């Protein structure tokens, strides 16, 4: 089975979507030793079994899946149409979150700790053809404050932690920064998450 990962041609080289494509390709190979091609949507060709589209690609827009008004900040959707799997979100960070969810749900990867990841081996990877997942976070700030794990970008991102305490590089989705106006957030925020 041949997979292709497609991402938008108009994104920055350090975009979280580029990291999502790298992680997806890495883990698809580790889990099922699949032949994977990664490209932007300007050089795309449909000569593979499964196409995974990350973000707002031309393929995503051509399938009529471009209405994301129902998604909130950090929300993502994972949907399948024919031989396409579309992972999209309100922001580039949420596309990365959706990619990690795909890895966990459909490849069986378990990010156990910041130092340990369980990677199963699958001989014949079969993905369902009726995927329709929408995820909206309950809280705008989601933090883990425990020693070295707090500074591991992979751990923070694959657990969808976002906070104002640790600087997370843009490639990993960035963060809210040290100072944040609670009035701008659409989700409930517990006061203990803000500096006094």
Image: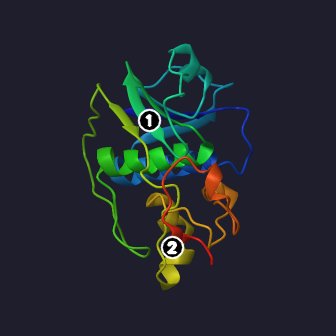
- Seen at 49% across and 68% down, the residue is 143
- Seen at 37% across and 18% down, the residue is 82
Which residue occupies the foreground of this view, 139 or 196?
A: 196
Image position, residue 64 (x, y; %): 51, 15
Q: Circle 1: is it few (<14), some (14-19), or many (20+) Cα within 10 Å?
A: many
Image position, residue 98 (x, y; %): 46, 44
User: Quick check: 154 above or below 116?
Assistant: above
**Spatial distance from mark 2 to mark 1, Cα to Cα?**
30 Å
Mark with earlier residue (2, 1)? 1
Q: Nearer the viewer, mark 2 or mark 1?
A: 2
User: Quick check: 170 above or below 156?
Assistant: above
* Secondary-structure class at tag 1: strand
What residue is disc 1 on? Answer: 77
**Contact between labelled residues 1 and 2, with CB atoms less than 8 Å apart:** no
Give the number of the disc on residue 101: none
- The answer to which image quadrant residue 110 occupies is bottom left
Image position, residue 95 (x, y; %): 53, 43
What residue is disc 2 on? Answer: 192
Image position, residue 151 (x, y; %): 57, 76
* Secondary-structure class at tag 2: helix
Which quadrant holds the N terminus? Answer: top left
User: Quick check: 127 above or below 17?
Assistant: above
Which residue occupies the foreground of this view, 163 or 189?
A: 189
- The answer to which image quadrant residue 168 occupies is bottom right
Q: Circle 2: is it few (<14), some (14-19), or many (20+) Cα within 10 Å?
A: few
Which quadrant holds the C terminus? Answer: bottom right
Which residue occupies the foreground of this view, 193 or 71?
A: 193
User: Quick check: 14 above or below 155?
Assistant: above
- The answer to which image quadrant residue 112 occupies is bottom left
Compared across the picture, whether 69 is left or right of 41 comes to left
- Seen at 63% across and 53% down, the residue is 183
Compared across the picture, whether 6 is left or right of 190 comes to right
């Amino acid at each position: 089975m041949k997979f292709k990962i497609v991402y938008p041609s108009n994104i920055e080289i350090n975009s979280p979507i580029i990291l999502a494509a790298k992680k997806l390709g890495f883990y698809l190979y580790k889990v099922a030793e699949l032949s994977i091609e990664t490209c932007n949507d300007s050089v795309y060709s449909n000569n593979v079994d499964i196409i995974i589209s990350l973000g707002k690609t031309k393929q995503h827009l051509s399938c009529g899946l471009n209405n994301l008004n129902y998604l909130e900040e950090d929300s993502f959707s994972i949907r399948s149409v024919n031989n396409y799997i579309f992972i999209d979100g309100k922001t580039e960070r949420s596309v990365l979150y959706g990619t990690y969810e795909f890895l966990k749900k459909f490849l069986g990867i378990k990010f156990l700790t910041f130092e340990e990841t369980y990677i199963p081996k699958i001989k014949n990877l079969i993905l369902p053809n009726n995927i329709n997942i929408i995820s909206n976070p309950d809280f705008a700030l989601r933090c883990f404050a425990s020693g070295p794990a707090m500074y591991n970008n992979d751990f923070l991102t694959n657990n969808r932690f976002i906070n104002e305490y640790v600087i997370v590089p843009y490639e990993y989705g960035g963060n809210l920064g040290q100072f944040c106006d609670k009035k701008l957030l659409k989700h409930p925020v517990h006061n203990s998450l803000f500096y006094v």
